[in-house]
Every structure is written in structure tokens, then in C-alpha cells.
Image (cartoon, rainbow, N blue to C red):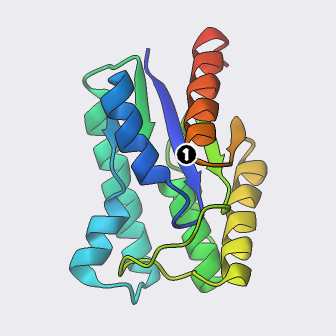
Amino acid sequence: MTLTVCFHGAESTGKSVLAARLSAARGWPWVPEYGRSYAETHGTAFTIDDLLAMARGQDDARAAALRAQPPVLLLDTDPLMTAAWARMLFGTVPEVLLGYPKADLYLLFAADRPWVEDGTRLFGTAAARARFAATAQDLLVETGVRWAPVSGDWAAREGQVVAAVERALAHPC
């Protein structure tokens, strides 16, 4: 059985960087953020249809990665995070976004790292980042998934992620 661990949270909190780092260091495969490549191709003037396409693409990539049956699979976002985007951009969450399979563990990355503009990010002000972080957490609570917070510098984040994954492996739900 594969433990799926989703990195969840506002933009520019280190999710992609840490997923790549842990994949290299621990051999845990990871599913990159489909929405990033989508935004780089289609732009960031998103519609609900764009978000639905991103969720489908992300979930298809997750399903493909699961076929290898690794012990741990890191997900650099999932449709639940896309739901947070929908709430941020449109004030609503299409039910379909909540119907996708959920990860076994969500790690909520705090917006306590410096925001870096990369051409695909939209919420760089302190107020917008705080609102996005709260929206991401609200969706974890609303859906009742298993989650843990991640914060601090890179070393602290890495240590918290590894500890959370090891706890989840030792005590699966």
C-alpha cells in the first residue's frame, strides 16, 4: 500500500522545492504541480473550467504514479488545493473538486517564507497570502482529512515533513 502525502498551502511556501529535495534524498517519488505547467502554457487568467482541467490533470498524474506502488508518494498539490484556488478566485468551490480521492496525509505549509514572483503566482501581498493560507486550512478542516502543519526554515520544514511521514507510516489511518 502506498502512503500518499499531499503538500498543501499558499503559493511560494516551498512545496515544490521540498518535494524535489525529499524525492532526491529519500527516494520518495513525487507528482509535480500540474497547475504550474498549465499556467505556463495557458496563462493565469483562470476560469472555473481552467481549474477543473488542472484538477483532472493533477489527479491523472497521481493515478499514473500510484501504478508503480511506491511506499510513499509525494503530491505537490491535489484537487483539494485547486478547490482553495477556486474559493480564492471565484468565491465558490465546485463540488467536483471535493469528490476526487484524498491523500492519506496533508501537510499544510505555512506562508512564513518569503514570497517569490515566478510568473504564475497571484497572491503576493501579506493580506492575500494570509487569506490564501487560511482558505487552504479551512478546506482541510471542512473535508476532515488527516493533516499536520509545516513551518519554519528549510531544515525545520524538511524535518517536520519527514517526521510526519514516518508517523503516518507507523500509524496508518
Q: Is residue 141 left or right of residue 125?
A: right
Q: Residue furthest bottom?
A: 45
Q: Residue at x 38, y 23 (%)?
A: 26
Q: Residue 114, relative to residue 46: is it above or below?
A: above
Q: Residue 133, relative to residue 16: is it above or below?
A: below
Percent x, y of residue 10: 59, 64
Q: Residue at x 41, y 84 (%)?
A: 46
Q: Residues within 10 Å of mark 1 (few under 14, many from 20)?
A: few
Q: Residue at x 40, y 16 (%)?
A: 71
Q: Is residue 150 visible?
A: yes
Q: Is residue 151 left or right of residue 74?
A: right
Q: Residue furthest top?
A: 170
Percent x, y of residue 129: 66, 74
Amino acid type assigned to the residue bearing label 1 in the image: Trp
Tell me the quarter of the picture where residue 56 sits.
Answer: bottom left
Tell me the quarter of the picture where residue 133 sits.
Answer: bottom right
Q: Is residue 113 left or right of residue 26?
A: right
Q: Which quadrant is the N terminus positioned in? A: top left
Q: Which quadrant is the C terminus positioned in? A: top right
Q: Nearer the viewer, residue 101 or 150?
A: 150
Describe the element under mark 1 as helix, strand or loop: helix
Percent x, y of residue 73: 40, 30
Q: How many marks?
A: 1
Q: Nearer the viewer, residue 94 or 131?
A: 131
Percent x, y of residue 98: 59, 55
Q: Residue at x 71, y 38 (%)?
A: 148
Tell me the quarter of the picture where residue 44 sits.
Answer: bottom left
Q: Is residue 77 visible?
A: no
- Which residue is denoted by mark 1 in the rendering? 154
